[in-house]
Each structure stands twice: as structure tokens, then as C-alpha cells.
Amino acid sequence: MKKALWGAAAGAAVAVAAAGGWWAWSQGRAVVPQAVEGSAKGGGPQGTASASADAPARAMAPLREVLANYRKIIVLLADEAKLGAAEKAAANQAGMALFHANIAKGKELVALLEEGPLAEPRMRLQVLPALLDYVESDPELFDADRLAFREVLRQWQALMARDGSLPAIKLHKRMGEDLDALAEIERNYEKEIREVFGRFESRGITLKRERWDDYVAQLQRLYTREAILRDHGVVLPYPEPPVADSGKGKNKAKDTEGAELNGRELPPKTIVLTFDDGPHGTYTPEIAAILKQYSVPAVFFQVGSNLGTVGADGKPHLHARAQVSKQLQDAGHVLANHSLTHAQLSKRSGDALRDEILVTDKLLTSVDERRSALFRFPYGARNAEGMDILSSAHLRSVMWNVDSLDWADPVPASIAQRVLSTVDKEGRGIILFHDIHERTVKALPGILAKLVADGYQFATWDGKAFVVPKGGPSPSAAAAAAPAAATAGSYGQSWAIVVGIDEYARWPRLQYAVRDARSVREALIQKFGFAAERIVTLENKDATRANILAAFHDKLAHSGMQKNDRLFVFFAGHGATRKLTSGRDLGYIIPVDSDPQQFATDAIPMSELQNIAESVTAKHTLFVMDACYSGLGLTRGGGNANFLRDNFKRVGRQMLTAGGADQLVADGGPNGHSVFTWALLQGLGGKGDLNGDGIITATELAAYVAPAVASASSQTPAFGSLPGSEGGDFVFELPTETEFLSAQSTQLGSEAIAMNTRLDAAKPAAAPASQAGTTAPSAAGPVPKVVAPVVVKDLQGNDQKITPPQAVTLSNRQLAQRANDRGLQLYREKQYEQAEAQFTEALKLRPDFALAANNLGFIYYRQDKFVEAARWFDNAIRMDPSRAVAYLNLGDALDKAGEADRARKAYTTYLELAPKAAGADKLREKLGL
């Protein structure tokens, strides 16, 4: 072996040891497949009184760990020529840790028989034959597996050589014969094993050439390289996709040479997007990704100190963040000057004022010579001297006429509403945003969706004027090409009417309708941001016919509902149908004061709901009825494969019902819910996001709920559009989960998990690649998911095929958040393996995602893999050192792993960061503080 390679490998091993790796492999419990591990338990000396009974098992556990580590090394390093540089380096480091772990484990095996409770000659002679039987003839072992035990056999043989008794001599001979057999196996497999192990030390191991591929294939069914690296605290990110060059064609709109620009000189229906104060390492790339989704340009006014410094020699020295600016320029956006330190320049003069402007221009030129000659005064505060300096430097001042106030307003929906209402008044403009706030990122998609839908054009700077690029979205083409749906930020206000009736006087009483209504209301408020004061709630005696109709005709009408708002209606109670003289069935919802003998006059017919739906002012309305209907006589809106692209332009009136005529609503769902409402709540909780883009449309919700309920009950839910609908789709935007999993995290009960398993079995599958028009995932990351069409009853009781929308394109940061959110959902259902895969995906997409690192660690913790858990809690702390719960989790994992000193240190840090947290006093008592 080359000395340089050995030195690098040894250095990696020392790093692993310093991080706790030595303890993990010499004392901890490794994870091996059930077929290999069996029921044996590892452990150290436990006293001679019980040694006789469990002696073979206590020695067998580390022996099996030796095999597991050996197998993992082979899986890590198989097909090395095909690995990328990062994956190869990670595999080498993990392989080195495993290799040295086996050295330590071999010493442990010898120590057990030489110094521990098994060292007594009689006990040792009892244990060794059982261990040799395993090595020689266990049916689970391949020939190549037995090579893992060669060094151990040699050490045992040396131990027997020091014992002159006849049984020891016989065992010495038996081990010699085993070593000869291993030497034969080694000769047969020489080339392949040397390629795997040669980097660690000179070994003359050879394996059967014709069986090696079969052996590796079998190991890869037991382990994967990704899983082994993950166990060692490594998840390799997806490679960054190349930045595409933008087109250079431009269509000049108006020459504004010589004037300070403020947006009112733009042509009608023309917008310039501007972002101040960056570049930000996280939010600027995410904003760029959103802009790419909509194919719109922007101007980024950047603070010089974020880009770098200029030395005394006048040479610029760029910081790492300047690469973000370079990527913006390459993507077709404009780089502009926003001063050096973001000082109030109206109070500066002389060289201080000149440096604020010119030093930043030098830095921008160093980033890319194509930087623009645009300048924006911080706070818009300028003076005559500053304007003179701009003129002499051939720079142009740019102001704005649409202020998002995103620097002050913490609510994305409010920011969006402010921008859209101001643009509506101005008719054109330069919009001021800041690319240093997460709320700007959240508000931007809704703003762009609405502006595109309303036919606005987006201009960029060509050196003399703002122009609309050729090939960019025109008023008509933009609406057809924008890939994103309307989001919650696109709506003005969110309204709801929620009705639940259990206590019918003249109809059979229900058990769970009120509880269903309350849970839906809670989800609307807590998960989707509906304001409590805009939700009309009617329960039991209050849910009369007059009050229900008044909620629509009076309360909503007089509360200021606007055309860009949304309305969600939920009814849980009885439903009925009546055959009309024409032969057509008409459905009714039953208020609390209805008489079964007169429901045709005192219930609410679906024809009345049709009238309400057509008269409601809101852009999108969704009725969800947990009752049974048939023959509604309603029409379904025309389909459009690309309806997400102009969804916000189209009025939507939709309904999802629980079942058809003569079908009883199943009240036997978990946690005191009907099956339908339980499935609805699961859908709104994230399961209805079928394409994984963080947005649930009413169509997606129906595609999840209808087959799920039908599979778990005798109900057949129906879905369709009401008269007056233009094909618009109601939209829920899933909030991002922020929970750091810990021992306090809640999980579903067994009844709920069992029901979800049944519901998920009917969940629509992803469409085949050929049908979806997509390719397999690339190195740049996952391909958006396309969901196959689903057959659901329409509102007339006929089969219809509905197709959930294609996923909105998201940035890697957004995709990482969605994967983390799915992982949390799976954790709550105790689906640890699937949750582990989702948290891993999140870290591939966003390697610095502390939340996902902690949550992955906790999945390991829940599976009693304490050493692996500690590695990921350590990773989370490195990413976010101030996150108290990660220290608590680390302390718990280390405590379980037996590392008392490290655990105490982690606990102490936790108490320093969260001295008043729940359980802090109990923890201090445990630590004796």
C-alpha cells in the first residue's frame, strides 16, 4: 500500500475515533440482519455466576458484529470505479472506521477468552467449540463470509497453544484445519478481495471468481451503501445542477435615459421586480428558483460588504457569497448597486459617500463585468452630492412605486395582498422586495401567480431602459405558461362555514358529527391560517335551517367577502334524497330542526346550495359534505390537463361528498371521527399532497379521500364541480413543519395507525414514466411526481376519471422541507424505515438541514440504534449549535449507549440553553446539579 493513501486512511480513522467511533465499535451494539444476528445479545462481563448459561451467546454477538462490519465494507466499496468523488471519499472514511472497528472487536473476542469471565479454562473450552461450529457450518454463511474470521481464528489458535491440555490441543488442530480451508478460499477469490481490502493493509485474501458477483449481490440485498454511510452520519447531497445560460434577446419598451426611474414611466401592465440588501446565502437562491418557475427576470440591488472587500492596494477580494451573485447574472438577472454598508447616504458626504458607491461598483464588476449601471439609495435617502457622484460614474438611480413592506410585515399573505392591491391601483411599477427575508420567499409565488394570471409583463434592464425580453411571457402566453398554482398567498381572505349536528330531535342521533366539525375547524385555523373570526360555526341546536342559510346570505355577504377570497364549507350531519316527479333524485342536507316527514320543505335542497355557490363572491369555493347524497343533478367542470397554469384566473365551485343514496355514514373512524372525516383530516394533514409539491388542490384531496373511504367502508364518496364553476381548483398550501423530534413528540395510537394503513393502501400511485412523460431521477435531484388518474364517482353517481395536477416545480430547499414533513408524518405512524428514507432525502437536497438531521437521529433512537443516533444529533448541533432539544436528544442517546461523560456534557449544555424547559428540574436531579 502507498504510504500517502495509508496516512490519509489512518487520519480518517483517527477522526472517527475522536468523534466517539472507537467507543461505538468496541462497546456498542452493531446492527446486522436478522438472519445473521439471530437472538444473540452482546455485552461485557456480567459475573461468573451466570456465565455458564449464556457464555456462547455472549461471545457470539461480537463475532457476528465482525461479520456484519466485513460485509458492510464490501458493499461500501463494491463498484468503486462508478462512484463520484464525494461518494468515494465518504465510502472510504466509513470503510476505514468499520475496518478498525473489526480490529477492536477481534481484540474484544480474545479478551473475553483470555481475561474476562470466560478465561477460566473449563469455560473457555466449552465456548470455543460452539464458536467454531458457527464459523465452519452455519447455513447462513457464504464461503466468502468465513474470511471475516481469519484473524480471530489465528488469535484463538495462539491462545490454545499456551494451554497444554488435550482438549486445547485438539481445538488448536481444528483451528489449523479451518485456517487451511480459509487459505484455499482466499486463493480462489484473490483479485476481488484484494481490490476491496488492499487499501487498508497487505492481505493475501482471494475468493472464487465465478461466485464473487453473486456474493456481493447477496450482501447488497442485506445492506446498501447509502444506509451504511447514513449509519455513520453521512448523507451525500445531490450534485448541483448546471446554471443554464439565458437568452439575450430583448424587446425595448421605452427609453428613459437621464431620468431617475421610479416605475411610473413603464408601459401599462409592465412590472419590474427588484430585490434589495442581498445576496443572502439561503433566500436569494430560493427566490431565483421561484423566478425561474415563472420565467420572469429581476434586478438584485446588492450590498457591497456582502460581496467582499477592497484592499489597501485597491484590489477586490470576494467572499463566498459572491458566487450567488454570479449565478444570478448567469441566470439572466441583473446585478445592481445598493451601497457598500447600507448606510443612510443622505447623511454622508465626501470620500465616505463616494466609497459607498464606487467601492461597491468595483466589487460588482469583479463579480461580473456585465453588472448594470443601476443604483438604489438605501431607504431611498439621497442628496444632491450623491446624485452628482452617480452622474459622474455613469450610474442611474432607481426608486420604486410599489413597496411590499416585507421588511416590516411578518405575514406573507399580507405582503402579497399589499403588493397586488398597490399594483392594481398603479397599473404598472417597480416593486421593492428584499431577498433577505423568508417571508418574501413565501409571499412571492402567490404574487407572481396573480400577476401572471392578470396578464402583466415583466421587464429587465438592457443598459438604457427597462424592456420586456423577447421570448418572455406575454400577457396571454404568460398565463398559459406559468407552472405554479394559486397558493394561499394568492387569496385575499379565507372564509369558512362549519356545521356539525349530533343532537337531532326527530332524526337518529349521531355520535361524531360535532367532533368532526370541531377538528376540521381546528385544522383550518392552526394548519391553513384561516382567521377564527372568519369562520362561522354552527353546532347542534344552532344549526337550524334558518341559521345555516343566514350564514351564507347574511354573515358572509355583510362581512366583506371579495372576489379573490376563498370559501370552505363543511357539513357533518344527516343527508337524504327524494325522487321528484320527473324521476330525478334530489339531495338534501338535514338541519337540526328538520322533520323526517316534511324534509322536502324544512331541509336544505342541493338546488339551494347550487344557487348559493353561484352567488358567492369568492374566487374558489369548496363544499365538503360528510353526509349521504344521490342524484344531485350537478354538472362537472371541463377538464384541463394544464389547469394549474391559470388556476387563479378561473372561478371554482366544487363539492366532495361522503357517500351516495342509501349509504350510512360510517362513524367508526379513529379518535371519535367518521371514516370520511378521518380520511379528510389525513388528506389535509399532508397525505392529500399526492404530487409532493406542498400544495393540496380539491382535486388531489378527492383523489386521496374517495378511494380511501371506499376501501375502508361501504361508502362511495363523490366529487365534482357545481354550476357556475369555470374549472378553478380550490387550493390548500401546506405549512412547513418545524418540530424537532424528541421524547416528547406524539405518535398516533394503534387504531389510527391501522386505519391509515387501510386508507393508504388505496392511495393513488405515481404514473409510469412513459405515461407521465418523465424520466428517472437524475443526479441533479428527484423528478416531480406525476399521479396516475383515479376513478371517482361524480355528483350524479357516474364514474369519472380525475387526474391530480402535475407537481409545481420547487427549489431544493422547498423539496427538502416537504421530505422532512413527510418524514414527520411517517414517524407519527411509527413507519420508521420510510421516515428514515424521507429525512435522508431532505438531507440530500439540503445538506445543512439541522431539523432533518435531528429527526433522522431520533428515528435511529426509536429503533435502539443509539450510536448511530448520537452521530446525527452531533451533526444537527454542528449545523445549528443553538438548538437546545438536539443536546437533550444527544444526551439521551449517549446515555443509552453507555457514554456517561459525553451524555452529561450534552445534558449540561441543554440545561444552559433551556433552563426552564419542561423536565429540566428532573434532569438536574438526575445529574445531581
Image (cartoon, grey):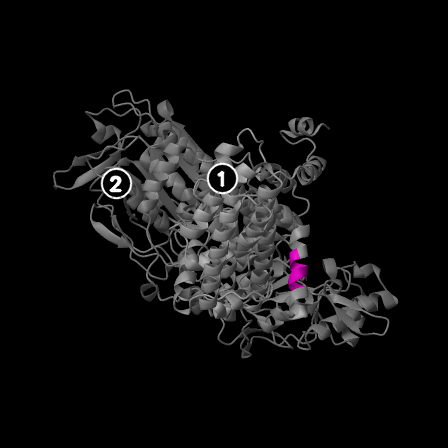
Q: Is residue 463 above or below residue 318?
A: below
* Image quadrant assignment for residue 615: top left
Q: Is residue 68 above or below residue 773?
A: above
Q: Is 762 left, or right, of 489 in this rendering?
A: left
Viewer-nearest of discs 1 and 2: 1
- Percent x, y of residue 495: 45, 40
Q: Residue at x 51, y 33 (%)?
A: 52
Query: Which residue in the structure is indicated by mark 1?
Result: 126
Disc 1 and disc 2: Cα gap in Å? 86 Å
For mark 1, give the secondary structure. helix
Question: Foreground residue, 290 or 207?
Answer: 207
Q: Main structural element of the magenta stretch: helix, strand or loop?
A: helix
Going by the numbered disc 2, the residue's amino acid type is Ser
Q: Is residue 823 left or right of residue 389?
A: left
- Residue 339 is situated, as x and y percent measured from the top left of the image, at 75, 64
State yes or no: residue 617 in magenta: no
Label 2 Cα crowd, 10 Å radius (few <14 / some 14-19 / many 20+): some
Q: Residue at x 61, y 76 (%)?
A: 462
Q: Earlier in the sequence, mark 1 or mark 2?
A: 1
| Marker disc for residue 607 | 2
Few, some or many residues within 10 Å of mark 1 (<14, 14–19, 20+): some
Query: What is the magenta range?
Result: 8-13
User: Which numbered dot is residue 385?
Assistant: none
User: Secondary structure under badge 2?
Assistant: helix
| Image x and y of residue 241, in percent | 53, 68
Amino acid type assigned to the residue bearing label 1 in the image: Gln
Quadrant of the drawing holding the N terminus: bottom right
Q: Nearer the viewer, residue 212 or 679?
A: 212
